[in-house]
Image (cartoon, rainbow, N blue to C red):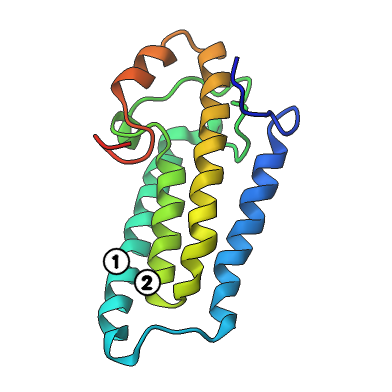
Amino acid sequence: MSRIPDLGRRGGGWVFLQSILFVAVAAMRLTGVRWPHADRAYLLAAGLALVVAGIALFAAARVVLGRAFTPFPRPRENGGFRDGGPYRVVRHPIYAAVLLIAVGYALARAPLAFVPTALLAIVFDLKARREEAWLAERYPEYDGYRRRTSRFLPFLY
């Protein structure tokens, strides 16, 4: 059993926390803090590349999940175990995709967005641990998958 709290029967508290942080990331643009003018074009290009990569990764992972997709960490009753597509490389490609988008946004438009993005990474890490405990309870093959697959970053974490 995981020591990470459930935060609700389906883990709704985790979804609430991440939603607050999504809004915080977007709101950092309203602070008026910008990158130095000389660096903006490069950071904009790098940030947009990360946003596009994040959207592509999200879409690919979403397609693989199909009807099993849920924002909640507790898997759907009729979801089924998935380890194809981007799930061959990382266990949580949707969380990785959202973090890529948030980092890209911070680079492109709002340097202060790195603060809620870092908090979002922590929330996703904890939410993923809670989710993995539930997945291991439901799918016997999950433990082997967990041992051979990185959580967010291929071959690193």
Per the image, label 1 sits on a secondary structure element best described as helix
Q: Residue at x 71, y 40 (%)?
A: 13
Q: In the rendered view, tell whether residue 143 sits above or below residue 17.
A: above
Q: In the rendered view, tell whether residue 130 sits above or below residue 99.
A: above
Residue type at mark 2: give it: Leu
Mark 2 in CB contact with mark 1 (< 8 angstroms): no
First in sequence: mark 2 or mark 1? 1
Q: Give coordinates of residue 135: x percent, y percent.
A: 53, 20
**Does 16 sit left or right of 93 as displayed?**
right
Nearer to me, 75 or 47: 47
- Tag 1 residue: 49
Q: Find residue 36 and report its image quarter.
A: bottom left
Disc number at residue 23? none
CA separation in Å, label 2 and label 1: 10 Å
- Tag 2 residue: 107
Nearer to me, 53 or 116: 116
Q: Give coordinates of residue 60: x percent, y percent.
A: 37, 44
Q: In the rendered view, tell whether residue 140 sits above or below residue 91.
A: above
Q: Quadrant of the N terminus?
A: top right
Q: Residue at x 50, y 20 (%)?
A: 80
Disc 2 crowd, CA 10 A, few/some/many (<14, 14-19, 20+): many
Q: Residue at x 48, y 48 (%)?
A: 121
Residue type at mark 1: give it: Ala
Q: Residue furthest top?
A: 140
Q: How many marks?
A: 2
Q: Find residue 141 and report its image quarter.
A: top left
Q: Give coordinates of residue 7: x percent, y percent.
A: 72, 34
Nearer to me, 49 or 146: 146
